[in-house]
Structures are given as structure tokens and as C-alpha cells.
Image (cartoon, rainbow, N blue to C red):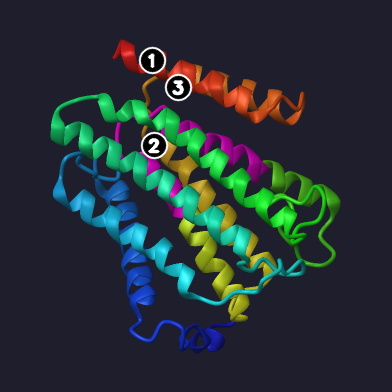
Amino acid sequence: MRISNAPRLIGHEDPFHLHKILGVSSLGHFGYRIFQCVQRPDHTLGFVSGDPWLLVWIAVHAALSGTSLVFAIPANRIRKLPMIWPEFRLHSILFAYRSLAAMLCFWADAYYATRLFSYGRGALVFATLLGADAVTAYYRRQEKLKPGETTMRSMPFPEGTSAAVIKSVNFYYSVSQVLATMNILFTTNANRPFAVLFPIQLAAFLMTLVRKSVLSAGEWHVAYGAALGVNYVYAGLVAGEGTIPMAQYWSLASAFVFSRFVLNVNKYWLWMWMVGIFWSRIRAI
């Protein structure tokens, strides 16, 4: 890490520093929620569905992702370093908004004393998948992507990284993406969608640090991997926020991972299965 390069983060594309203010506010909010997890007896993040402050923080994080569009970024993927490129930026916004929309569903259910909005989380999962695939298809048509290249599994690693390490890390990223989507579905409050949001928004910031020569490629992977790991730690600390028992959750996750990454079953069929379980479970609650 080269802290001496941090002044490079101040550029002319954000003259009123709106994105920076939103970024600092969001990082501070993530830190506050982690503090809440540590100091609260139940180790939850402390969100209260129906609380107006939940709407405020949803708006702040949504604006952070949205205002990233004002920045000029390389038109093509930089294949030697993990930096932001157009496809990644749109994916980041889509998946960030998925978490925020799920949090909004919980707020609306509590505010209007209904469960109607939570049913929308199933549609939200498919809308995000379709949106991300549409973005990738667009950039493939523009010949900005190589055949078989994907957003995360093609992320650059430091020169000399062994094929075994790359394969293991990419598997960790893939499994984490599956669990993140399952957490959007099988949760009872806004805490887990927010925990899922943390590595999504942090990844983009870390890429900016790489672009400004503050972080190296290896440091990006370590920091991003640790941010994903926060969700595993949180799941271990708080086991009572799911709509299904933990044993069933991990059984479903294992079946999904095996079907997707070993048997190569189409992801849409698998998520139709998961959403079907989600809808049947939410009706039973």
C-alpha cells in the first residue's frame, strides 16, 4: 500500500466533492454497523425496519453508486490490474441496488404492516441477473470482452500467481456470490442485504485505489476477499435471521454450488428453484 499516492484521489470530475462525501459517509456507515455488530449482545447490525433513518441510509448508498457514473474510466478492461471498466461499473450499480431494494422491501413491509413487498425479492433476484447478463451481452457485441471472459473470474492477479491459487480464489468469489443472493432471499430483515452490500461497494473503491497506485493487484484481492469474509463471520455470529433453518440453508447452498460449478446447470433454472422455495417459505411464515 502506498499511502503517499492518496492525494491522487482528488480529481476534477467531482468539483463539488459529492461522490467523495457520499463515499466517506458510506464507509463511516459500514464502520458504524460493524461496531454495532461487535458491541450489541445479539451481534446484529441494528437496523430497524420502518425506521425513517433506514430510508436515509438507503438513499446515501444508492447515491454513492449512482454518482460513480460521472467519472471517466477506461473504455476497455485493463487486464493487468483490477480497475473499474464500464461493464464492472454497471454490474456494481445493479448488485448494489439489489441489496438496497431488498432493504427497502423490509422497510415498506414494516411501515405498511404487510408482507407484500417481501414477495418482490424473488423478482428482484431475476431482474438483477437479467440486467447483469444484458450488460455483459452489450459489451460482447461491442467486442470489449474476450470469449469466455467474466467480470470476477477474469479479474487480474499479480504476475506469478499460481493457477491453483487463482482457481481457489475464483471459486471462493463464485460461492460468495451464490450465498449473497441466497441471503437476499432467505433473510428476515435488512441486516443481511446490507452486509452483502459491503463488499460490492468496497470493491469499486478498492479498484479506484488500484487505479491511483495506492493498492497493488494482490492487495486488492486480499482486501476484497476479507470484505466478502465479513459476511461469513456475520453468519456465524447471528444465526437467527433466516426464514429457513441453517442446516437447510447450507444444504441448499451446497446443492446449488455442486449443480452450478460441477454439473454446469443453467443458473436461471437453479434460481427458479431457489425462488420457488423462498415463496413457499414466506407463505408459511
**Does the residue at mark 3 contact the one at mark 1 (Cβ under 8 Å)?**
no
* Quadrant of the drawing holding the C terminus: top left
Counting residues from the start of the chain, the first of labels 3 and 1 encountered is 3
Give the residue at x 35% y 63%: 63
- Nearer the camera: disc 3 or disc 1: 1
Give the residue at x 48% y 17%: 276
Residue tagged by mark 3? 246
- Nearer the camera: disc 2 or disc 1: 1
**Does the residue at mark 2 contact the one at mark 3 (Cβ under 8 Å)?**
no
**Does the residue at mark 2 contact the one at mark 1 (Cβ under 8 Å)?**
no
Tell me residue 33's x, y (percent).
31, 53
Q: For the residue carrying disc 3, how many other residues have a C-alpha within 10 Å: few (<14), some (14-19), or many (20+)?
A: some
Residue tagged by mark 1? 281
Amino acid type at mark 1: Arg
Mark seen at residue 46: none
Mark seen at residue 237: 2
Tell me residue 121's x, y (percent).
39, 32
Magenta span: 172-198
Toward the viewer: 232 or 268? 268
Question: Is residue 226 found left or right of 266 in the rendered image?
Answer: left
Q: Quadrant of residue 262?
A: top right
Helix, strand, or loop for circle 3?
helix
Residue 103 visible somewhere in the drawing: yes
Q: Quadrant of residue 99?
A: top left
Up the image or down, 278 lies above or below 1; here it is above
Amino acid type at mark 2: Leu
Amino acid type at mark 3: Met
**Label 2 – label 3 distance at C-alpha:** 12 Å
Tell me residue 145's x, y (percent).
76, 57
